[in-house]
Amino acid sequence: MSDKYEEATPVLGSQIRTLRRAAGLTLEGLARRTGTSAPTIHRYESGWDRFELATLRRIAAGLGASLEVRLVPGPGPARDGRPSRAALRRLLAPLFWDRDLSTEDLETSQDWVLARVLTAGGLEQVRAVRAAFGDRAILRAVRRRDVDARTRNYWRLILGGA
């Protein structure tokens, strides 16, 4: 995911809320108008990033707005689909509040880095380490003692590992 997507998510939610309030609608009122639920509208307004296009269309119609969805070319991944080590370090650095993460750590302490990302990282960070290191490395990392049982079982289930 690009930074533009991350920036667009709260903007879209804010736009829905602004238009709903300008129309004098409550969450329940917009939900009735769009055939969805008030909690769904609330999630969308609060930064939910798993939008369903059909629901967005109904919300836009219910607000008397138009919906525009665009794909904009970006810099793209490296040739092999993996992020550069420098880009990966920048993406993961916020997860390492207790120590400066170096590009060398990505090689020498791979299991430690992966364990931290799998237990505390977001979707973009997890996708990046999967692309960079692969699923075998993920399965190896979840065997660490500092990975909780729930995280370990989740990744074993997702990746089909023992």
Image (cartoon, rainbow, N blue to C red):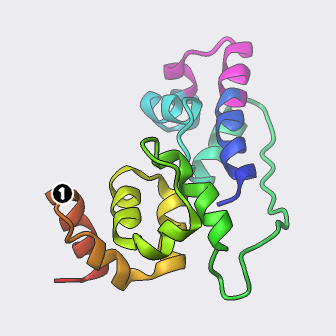
Q: Which image quadrant is residue 161 in?
A: bottom left
Left or right? Give the position of 61 relative to 112. right
Disc 1 is placed on an element classified as: helix
Q: Residue at x 67, y 14 (%)?
A: 21
Number of marks: 1
Q: Residue at x 24, y 59 (%)?
A: 151
Q: Which image quadrant is residue 140 in?
A: bottom left
Looking at the rendered structure, the kind of residue marked 1 is Arg
Instruction: Characterize the magenta stretch by its predominant secondary structure.
Output: helix
Residue 122 visible in the picture: yes
Q: What's the magenta region?
A: 15-30
User: Percent x, y for residue 99?
Assistant: 46, 47
Left or right? Give the position of 37 relative to 12. left
Would you place residue 106 above or below residue 53 in this image?
below
User: Percent x, y for residue 112?
Assistant: 35, 64
Looking at the image, the residue that sits furthest to the bottom is 80
24 drawn magenta: yes
User: Quarter holding the N terminus?
Assistant: bottom right
Quick one: label 1, few (<14), some, or many (20+) residues within 10 Å? few
- Find disc 1 in the rendering and name its residue: 150
Looking at the image, the residue that sits furthest to the top is 24
User: Percent x, y for residue 12?
Assistant: 70, 37
Left or right? Give the position of 22 relative to 124. right
Using the image as rendered, state which of residue 137 and residue 19 is in the foreground.
137
User: Quarter holding the C terminus?
Assistant: bottom left
